[in-house]
Image: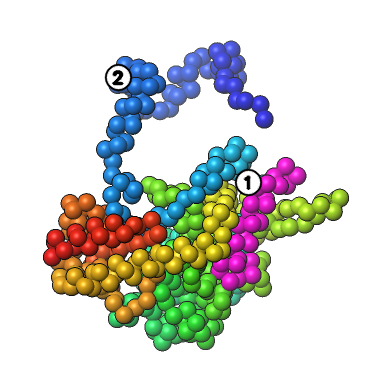
């Protein structure tokens, strides 16, 4: 590809002549003068070294997840990041490629997508996975619309656990309202888990699907076998949503328990926490519903010489086929993020992922034990329920107040539930990963004792 060359003065004159204009100002005459800016009030130019040092000093004043003990989670998690991930992502042939429209020159990208699909399929316990989605929220939307199509639009109710991430539920509400699909929300029981009987009652004979998150928004592991049975008893499809993908290193994916779809957020696989993204949605289903799967699928084949090759086997999004026949118009291939997840998973390996998940679990249980030992006024909201690497802490004050008070002690304690609503207690969601050292746990426990 030739480097881009900007238009010069002669090019501008030719363009204006073709448009029948005399000046650039005429081209923008329709823009109100009140919103036009005549120059920017910027300081004098500085040399590159001065700029770098100044911005570096400004950045040093920020508090980062690595600068003090950090227990933030609620759908975005910090995990180890092997340097090989950024090294591969930074290669120009991957960094600049958006989508593999031409398979003959896109074999590297297609193979990465194929490997990503294979890894997700193995982790979720389902037959097939697609070539990724925007994020966990849109993955849930796609799963609900997928279920509606599979049941030929004969059922117009989506049953959803209240303990699905609140932001995911909001996105789903937006899409289902436009599609004329009703949503019923089932609150958790006293133990923070979903009751299968309440699922049966809510689903009745109208539900096209029941969506459950595990570990749920409160960090609690749901009883997936019973929930799958309850869902199928009502003739609906069972959807498992996963926001902490690292849990799949120690917990079986929903496909092992009969779930029809497992979808969610794969940010934990090599995508560092950022200011709202980018994230990485994934979607896996059983092969019998393959043609209703959103997005696209990379498959393995051979070329004319019999050599292993890859191509897009199934493309169901509106950019590839007639819009009326498309399964989705919002999905895309988050190619770079899928590449990050693939490199991360291959670098960590199966044993490494299990060890990482076990480390998260062990550190979480240790912090829960120490909080229990401190006692009043601190308590675990659901002490008897199994959790993975996140739990709800309740103390003297609202979740927002607790987070602010613990921050004064040098600890980013977690995410307050105050702003999320819900029927659960007002407290702090505390997330513990393998990145939290013993000193971090000491600092958290010490801060709680000081505020007791």
Relative to 425, 148 lies left or right = right
**Percent coordinates x, y for residue 44 in the rendering:** 31, 16
Q: Residues within 10 Å of mark 1 (few under 14, many from 20)?
A: some
Residue 35 left/right relative to 301: left
Look at the image and tell me whether residue 151 can be seen: yes
Relative to 45, is 247 above or below? below
Q: Residue at x 53, y 17 (%)?
A: 21
- Give the left or right position of residue 158, taking residue 103 as reference: left
Q: How is the image coloured?
A: rainbow
| Depth check, front residue: 396 or 183 | 396
Which quadrant would the C terminus be assigned to in this image? Answer: bottom left
Identify the residue under disc 2: 43
- Name the image quarter holding the N terminus: top right
Q: Secondary structure at mark 1?
A: loop
Q: Is residue 401 magenta?
A: no
Q: Which range is magenta? A: 101-128
Q: Which residue is mark 1?
A: 99
Residue lying farthest to the top in this orientation? 10
* 102 drawn magenta: yes
- In the displayed structure, 30 sits above or below 135; it is above
Q: Residues within 10 Å of mark 2 (few under 14, many from 20)?
A: few
Q: How many marks?
A: 2
Q: Is residue 318 above or below residue 22?
A: below
Q: Residue at (44%, 49%) from the top-left corner?
A: 272
Secondary structure beneath dot 2 equals loop
Q: Which of the labelled discs sits on residue 434, or is there none? A: none
- Which of the marked residues, 2 or 1, is nearer the chain's N terminus? 2
Q: Measuring 47% from the left and 84% from the top, which residue is drawn there?
A: 226
């Amino acid at each position: 590809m030739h480097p881009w060359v900007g238009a010069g003065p002669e090019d501008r004159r030719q363009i204006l002549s073709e448009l029948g204009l005399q000046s650039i100002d005429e081209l923008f005459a329709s823009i109100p003068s009140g919103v036009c800016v005549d120059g920017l009030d910027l300081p004098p130019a500085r040399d590159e070294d001065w700029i770098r040092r100044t911005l570096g000093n400004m950045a040093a004043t920020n508090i980062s997840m690595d600068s003090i003990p950090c227990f933030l989670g609620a759908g975005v998690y910090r995990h180890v990041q092997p340097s090989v991930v950024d090294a591969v992502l930074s290669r120009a042939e991957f960094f600049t490629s958006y989508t593999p429209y031409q398979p003959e020159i896109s074999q590297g990208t297609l193979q990465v997508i194929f490997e990503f699909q294979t890894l997700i399929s193995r982790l979720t316990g389902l037959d097939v996975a697609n070539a990724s989605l925007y994020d966990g929220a849109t993955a849930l939307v796609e799963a609900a619309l997928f279920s509606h199509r599979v049941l030929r639009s004969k059922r117009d109710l989506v049953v959803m656990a209240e303990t699905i991430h609140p932001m995911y539920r909001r996105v789903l509400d937006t899409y289902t309202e436009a599609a004329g699909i009703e949503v019923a929300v089932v609150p958790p029981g006293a133990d923070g888990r979903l009751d299968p009987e309440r699922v049966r009652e809510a689903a009745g004979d109208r539900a096209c699907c029941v969506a459950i998150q595990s570990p749920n928004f409160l960090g609690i592991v749901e009883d997936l076998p019973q929930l799958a049975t309850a869902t199928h008893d009502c003739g609906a499809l069972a959807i498992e949503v996963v926001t902490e993908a690292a849990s799949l290193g120690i917990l079986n994916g929903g496909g092992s328990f009969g779930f029809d779809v497992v979808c969610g957020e794969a940010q934990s696989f090599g995508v560092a926490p950022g200011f709202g993204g980018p994230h990485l949605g994934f979607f896996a289903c059983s092969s019998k519903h393959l043609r209703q799967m959103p997005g696209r699928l990379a498959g393995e084949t051979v070329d004319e010489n019999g050599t292993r090759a890859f191509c897009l086997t199934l493309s169901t999004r509106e950019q590839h086929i007639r819009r009326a026949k498309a399964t989705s118009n919002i999905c895309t291939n988050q190619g770079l993020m899928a590449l990050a997840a693939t490199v991360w998973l291959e670098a960590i390996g199966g044993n490494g992922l299990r060890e990482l998940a076990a480390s998260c679990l062990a550190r979480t249980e240790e912090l829960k034990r120490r909080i229990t030992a401190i006692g009043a006024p601190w308590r675990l909201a659901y002490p008897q329920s199994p959790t993975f690497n996140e739990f709800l802490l309740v103390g003297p004050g609202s979740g927002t107040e607790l987070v602010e008070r613990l921050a004064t002690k040098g600890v980013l304690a977690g995410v307050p539930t105050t702003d999320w609503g819900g029927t659960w207690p007002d407290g702090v969601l505390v997330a513990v990963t393998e990145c939290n050292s013993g000193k971090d746990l000491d600092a958290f426990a010490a801060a709680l004792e000081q505020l007791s």
